[in-house]
């Protein structure tokens, strides 16, 4: 049995991870630390809150005394670090929060883990797993090879730069102090509990409400899309089988241009409305309820500063060494995502009206 501290687990990827881990490792104890900033939503964890093997603590990863207390009191042996400011647009308008959480917060966790596991206990069996992003590698031209673990870092936004710095700190604590660490760099995630400011849930909810679907520039920016459960599956493999001090790229083998993502999303929603008459009653403002198609809402807007052209993950290392294989292609994963949002309207309505902050 392992005792996990999972940071940022009220967010999108973190909450999916703890649901996944609870299903796959039911005997393990899970302690969640989350500051419940704007993207942290305790409703993501509702089904786990009554579980005797699960505990939620509200607090910041920058609070060293709190982190140290939790490590000791719960005898934590595995720390899985998701907590991060992650929205590129927000990092452009307000980069300070990204420096504080992503750099200072990561360093605070590393210091507390070193103090407890190495200085106090001399604990042999421990692991600090750090969850990062493909954006640390910068951007790719259309014919460039995909990002591998050997790709030079070249972050182009304050968000990406803050994550790159945190990656280097994690590496340094392994090589300098002997802390057992692993790092994963993932491509764009999608799936349940995705905060509605991101491309897929934003466009889906805009279709339902009849609002424009904003596409930056020409919409030809390419991303590798990873269904969130496939990401969790990859992290589990790294935690259980990964080599300490190593980095593993987790990708979905799904490169899509943003405009094509939105067009596929529109087709799926059109199909749902065509086959379920109740949707027109639930969402009367949608063009799909009025005999029009969802793609009529597509609107091109000015590109954002420093917008990377293409991300793509070369996942051959984790596939070859750890046996990782994504189980969802983009078509199947996007269908599952649309169905989850249609079936969980109270969850996203609480975000849109702000009541989720009262949970």
Image (spheres, rainbow, N blue to C red):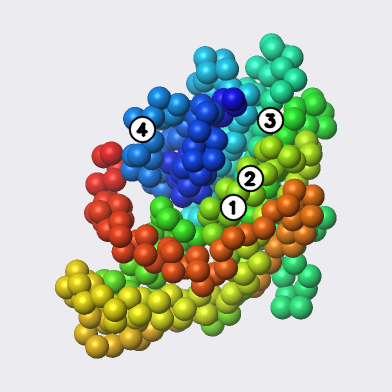
On the image, numbered disc 2 is attached to which residue?
235
- The answer to which of 305 and 347 lies nearer the viewer is 347
Which residue is most to the top? 120
Mark 4 to mark 1 CA distance (whole Å): 23 Å
Q: Earlier in the sequence, mark 2 or mark 3?
A: 3
Depth order, front residue of 69/225: 225
Examine the image and state in which quarter residue 287 appears.
bottom left
* Residue 220, percent from left and from top: 58, 80
Q: Are marks 1 and 2 in contact (CB under 8 Å)?
A: yes
Residue at the image position 68 percent from the left and 30 percent from the top: 127
State if disc 3 and disc 2 touch (CB < 8 Å). no
Q: Secondary structure at mark 2?
A: helix
Residue 49's tag is 4
Count residues near mark 4 (Cα–Cα under 10 Å), then give few for <14, some for 14-19, many for 20+: few
Tell me how far mark 2 sits from mark 3, CA to CA. 12 Å
Q: Secondary structure at mark 4?
A: loop
| Residue on which disc 3 sits | 127
Percent from the top left, x then y, of residue 272? 33, 75
Give the image location of residue 223, x and y in percent.
61, 69
Decide if residue 285 is in sight here. Answer: no
Residue 143 versus residue 79 in the image, above or below = below
- Which of disc 2 and disc 4 is earlier in sequence? 4
Q: Do the CB atoms of the residues marked 3 and 1 lie less than 8 Å apart?
A: no
Q: Is residue 264 visible to us here?
A: yes
How far apart are labels 3 and 1 at the CA level?
18 Å
Residue 231 — which label? 1
Q: Earlier in the sequence, mark 3 or mark 1?
A: 3
């Amino acid at each position: 049995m392992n005792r996990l501290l999972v940071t940022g687990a009220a967010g999108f990827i973190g909450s999916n991870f703890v649901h996944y881990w609870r299903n796959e490792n039911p005997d393990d104890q899970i302690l969640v630390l989350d500051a419940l900033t704007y993207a942290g939503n305790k409703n993501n964890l509702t089904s786990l809150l009554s579980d005797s093997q699960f505990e939620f603590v509200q607090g910041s990863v920058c609070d060293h005394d709190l982190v140290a207390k939790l490590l000791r009191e719960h005898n934590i042996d595995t720390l899985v670090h998701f907590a991060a400011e992650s929205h590129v647009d927000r990092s452009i308008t307000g980069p300070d929060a990204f420096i504080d959480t992503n750099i200072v917060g990561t360093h605070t966790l590393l210091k507390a883990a070193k103090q407890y596991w190495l200085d106090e206990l001399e604990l042999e069996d421990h692991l600090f797993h750090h969850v990062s992003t493909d954006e640390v590698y910068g951007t790719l031209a259309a014919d460039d090879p995909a990002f591998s673990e050997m790709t030079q870092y070249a972050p182009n936004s304050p968000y990406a730069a803050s994550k790159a710095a945190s990656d280097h700190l994690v590496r340094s604590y392994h090589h300098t102090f002997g802390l057992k660490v692993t790092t994963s760099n993932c491509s764009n995630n999608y799936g349940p509990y995705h905060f509605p400011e991101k491309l897929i849930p934003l466009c889906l909810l805009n279709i339902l409400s009849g609002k424009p679907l904003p596409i930056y520039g020409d919409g030809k920016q390419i991303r590798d899309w990873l269904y969130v459960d496939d990401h969790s599956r990859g992290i589990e493999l790294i935690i259980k089988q990964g080599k300490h001090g190593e980095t593993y790229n987790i990708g979905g083998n799904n490169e899509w241009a943003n405009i094509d993502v939105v067009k596929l999303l529109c087709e799926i929603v059109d199909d749902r409305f065509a086959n379920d008459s109740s949707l027109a009653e639930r969402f009367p403002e949608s063009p799909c309820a009025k005999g029009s198609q969802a793609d009529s809402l597509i609107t091109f807007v000015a590109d954002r500063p420093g917008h990377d052209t293409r991300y793509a993950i070369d996942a051959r290392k984790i596939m070859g060494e750890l046996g990782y294989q994504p189980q969802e292609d983009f078509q199947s994963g996007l269908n599952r995502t649309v169905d989850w949002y249609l079936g969980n309207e109270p969850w996203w309505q609480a975000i849109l009206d702000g009541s989720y902050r009262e949970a």
